[in-house]
Amino acid sequence: MIRFILLQNRQGKTRLAKYYIPLEESEKHKVEYEVHRLVVNRDPKFTNFVEFRTHKVIYRRYAGLFFSLCVDITDNELAYLESIHLFVEILDHFFSNVCELDLVFNFHKAIIERMGELEKQE
């Protein structure tokens, strides 16, 4: 089960945060800070999976953004890595070469329109 999704830049600024568990605002900021410290300082030679408290964080870096998912310790890491990649491909297709500013200023537009497309396909 996904606990939360974070999109953060290299400086630690959170561009998107979606929590699927209830957390206080102060705890959310603490989690965002801890996750950023974990992924930004990690050697690229290591895997994209790291234990975080009683869960694990699966992350991937695309240009200057880190896409991080916090999931249960028993979940399949490769499936989540593939879902991160699929999400980035969808964003890239929608924005024609996505960048951080697209996410900051147009993200609501992307999600609403993409959801409409998916509903039409069903």
Image (cartoon, helix red, strand yellow):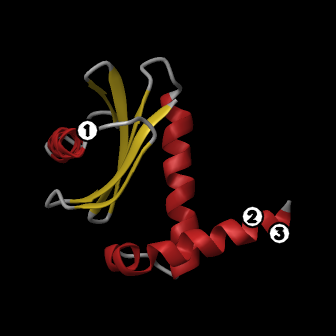
Q: Which residue occupies 40% across, 41% down?
A: 4
- Check disc 3 and report the residue beneath it: 120
- For the residues bearing labels 2 and 3, Cβ distance under 8 angstroms: yes
Task: Determine whether the residue tagged by mark 3 lies in a helix, strand or loop.
Answer: helix
Splitting the image into 4 quarters, where does residue 12 fall? bottom left
- Give the amino acid at mark 2: Leu
- Check disc 2 and report the residue beneath it: 118
| Res 45 label | 1
For the residue pair 18 and 13, the one nearer the viewer reads as: 18
Q: Which residue occupies 26% across, 40% down?
A: 24
Instruction: Assess disc 1: are there few (<14), some (14-19) or many (≥20) residues with their C-alpha within 10 Å of its C-alpha.
Output: few
Locate residue 110, reporting x and y percent.
Answer: 54, 74
For the residue pair 5 and 49, the one nearer the viewer reads as: 5
Instruction: Assess disc 2: are there few (<14), some (14-19) or many (≥20) residues with their C-alpha within 10 Å of its C-alpha.
Output: few
Query: Which of the marked residues, 1 or 2, is nearer the chain's N terminus?
Result: 1
- Give the amino acid at mark 1: Lys
Give the distance between the C-alpha atoms of the residues marked 1 and 3, in whole angstroms.
42 Å
Task: Determine whether the residue tagged by mark 2 lies in a helix, strand or loop.
Answer: helix
Q: Which residue occupies 44% across, 80% down?
A: 106
Locate residue 104, reporting x and y percent.
Answer: 34, 75
In screen coordinates, is 44 left or right of 1? left
- Give the amino acid at mark 3: Lys
- For the residues bearing labels 1 and 2, Cβ distance under 8 angstroms: no
Give the distance between the C-alpha atoms of the residues marked 2 and 3, in whole angstroms.
5 Å
Q: Is residue 22 above or below residue 16?
A: above
**Front position among marks 1 and 3:** 3
For the residue pair 104 and 9, the one nearer the viewer reads as: 104
Instruction: Assess disc 3: are there few (<14), some (14-19) or many (≥20) residues with their C-alpha within 10 Å of its C-alpha.
Output: few
